[in-house]
Image (cartoon, grey):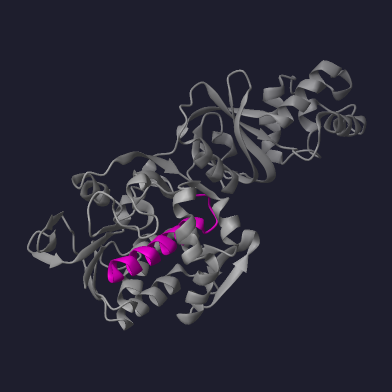
């Protein structure tokens, strides 16, 4: 059985490994000069390989394709990934949130381990190969490059999404799938920054244990997430924001606000009591100088501005109404929502090949025999924390085994 795998990321490498283990003659095509190019930048260069959790916990972190992925994640679970890494001689560690990284904190070590296994199994690796067409004929699957036409029995498309096109994710897989009659769900940025106005002076400020959300112009909550966030030059980022972006990327958002609850552990009345105590110790200070015990220094001016209380007003002159407005701002710091960041800069791509047209037990197309899919090219995505690479590995495992065994 001759199997071609298009795409040398985690889904493609796993597909090639498993297909070869099951006796197939495998050729792995990668348009870049090396395998796993996007993995080099994943996890801020550390590569969050998986999440050390049960399949049930894993599925709770899937945004799109939960039912479709259930079988694949059970066939090759996060636990199986840990065992696989051990078998490859890759030292790993589990950090906060059950995130799994190489002990070295170098994504290159993960890629080297995967690449060695691909090579050990005799997979033919074709680097700098740009597949421009995939055609299905009676005599097999024809893969076309600028100079060659090659014939295989089966093909696995693992070309990724549209994020970080410099790593080779340029949407080729969608074109191949569409040619075979597949519906392509509109691609959207997932796990990305949220662009908003009014944050320029806060660039670089990191906040922990806050609740960041999106509300409509009437203040009705649309979605929110607890955790860490970071202000950037033109928006917000960080783990909580990335998760939030995936919760809302299928919604039509207009006239909305990004909100930050700076004190989520305190209800309004308890926060009001806390402010009263702080004010009691600072009665003769200007308002702008009375928030140092409550906020990071760089947030003071923005909170004061949104409260509407004059900066130079003495604390002993602040009315109960003004204090209540301050409490509201501390629980609802607002910045006008502009949009989600460009899909080019999203960590993963939501949307892709419609999973209703793919057999979840085999990853084979329901539209075209001998065509298989793995990874981000499909309409599947999950939250941050190692879940997306695990999806690539699980679906790659199923696709590789199915393509080899039929």
State the residue in front, 304 or 87: 87
Q: Please name the residue shown 40% across and 60% down the image.
A: 395
Q: Which residues are magenta?
A: 382-406
Residue 58 lies in quadrant: bottom right
Q: Name the main secondary structure of what is drawn in magenta.
A: helix
Residue 385: percent from the left, percent from the top? Answer: 55, 56
Q: In the image, is residue 150 above or below residue 124?
A: above
Q: Is residue 88 magenta?
A: no
Q: Please name the residue shown 37% across and 47% down the image.
A: 355
Q: Could you tell me if residue 46 is visible in this image?
A: no
Q: Is residue 390 magenta?
A: yes
Quick one: quadrant of the N terminus? Answer: bottom left
Q: How many marks?
A: 0
Is 85 on the left or on the right of 29, as rendered?
A: right
Residue 259: percent from the left, percent from the top? Answer: 62, 31
State the residue in front, 51 or 231: 51
Residue 328: percent from the left, percent from the top? Answer: 74, 25
Residue 267: percent from the left, percent from the top? Answer: 81, 33
Residue 52 lies in quadrant: bottom right
Quick one: quadrant of the C terminus? Answer: bottom left
State the residue in front, 36 or 11: 11
State the residue in front, 285 or 321: 321
Q: Could you tell me if residue 55 is visible in this image?
A: yes
Is 265 on the left or on the right of 261, as rendered?
A: right
Q: In the image, is residue 171 above or below residue 49?
A: above
Q: Please name the residue shown 20% across and 48% down the image.
A: 180
């Amino acid at each position: 059985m001759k199997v071609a795998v298009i795409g040398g990321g985690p889904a493609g490498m796993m597909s090639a490994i498993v297909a070869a283990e099951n006796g197939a003659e495998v050729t792995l095509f990668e348009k870049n000069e090396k395998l796993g190019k996007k993995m080099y930048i994943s996890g801020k260069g550390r590569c969050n390989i998986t999440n050390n959790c049960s399949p049930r916990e894993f599925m709770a972190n899937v945004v799109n394709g939960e039912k479709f992925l259930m079988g694949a994640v059970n066939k090759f679970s996060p636990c199986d990934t840990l065992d696989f890494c051990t078998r490859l001689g890759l030292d790993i560690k589990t950090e906060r949130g059950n995130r799994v990284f190489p002990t070295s904190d170098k994504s290159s070590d993960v890629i080297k381990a995967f690449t060695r296994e691909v090579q050990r199994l005799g997979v033919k690796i074709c680097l700098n190969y740009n597949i421009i067409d995939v055609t299905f004929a009676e005599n097999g699957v024809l893969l076309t490059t600028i100079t060659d036409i090659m014939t295989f029995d089966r093909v696995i498309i693992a070309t990724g999404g549209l994020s970080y096109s410099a790593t080779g994710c340029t949407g080729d897989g969608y074109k191949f799938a569409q040619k075979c009659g597949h519906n392509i769900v509109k691609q959207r940025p997932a796990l990305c920054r949220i662009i908003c106005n009014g944050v320029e002076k806060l660039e670089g400020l990191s906040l922990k244990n806050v609740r960041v959300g999106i509300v409509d112009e009437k203040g009705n909550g649309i979605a929110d997430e607890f955790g860490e966030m970071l202000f950037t030059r033109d928006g917000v980022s960080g783990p909580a924001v990335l998760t939030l972006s995936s919760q809302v990327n299928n919604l039509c958002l207009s006239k909305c606000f990004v909100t930050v609850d700076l004190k989520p552990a305190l209800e309004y009345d308890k926060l009001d009591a806390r402010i009263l105590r702080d004010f009691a110790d600072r009665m003769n200070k200007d308002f702008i100088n009375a928030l140092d015990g409550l906020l990071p220094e760089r947030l003071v001016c923005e909170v004061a501005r949104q409260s509407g209380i004059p900066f130079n007003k003495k604390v002993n002159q602040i009315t109960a109404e003004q204090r209540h407005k301050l409490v509201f701002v501390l629980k609802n710091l607002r910045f006008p929502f502009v949009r989600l960041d460009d899909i080019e800069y999203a960590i993963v791509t939501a949307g892709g090949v419609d999973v209703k047209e793919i057999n979840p037990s085999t990853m084979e197309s329901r539209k075209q025999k001998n065509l298989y899919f793995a990874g981000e090219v499909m309409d599947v995505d999950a939250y941050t924390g190692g879940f997306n690479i695990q999806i690539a590995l699980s679906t790659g495992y199923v696709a590789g085994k199915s393509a080899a065994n039929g």
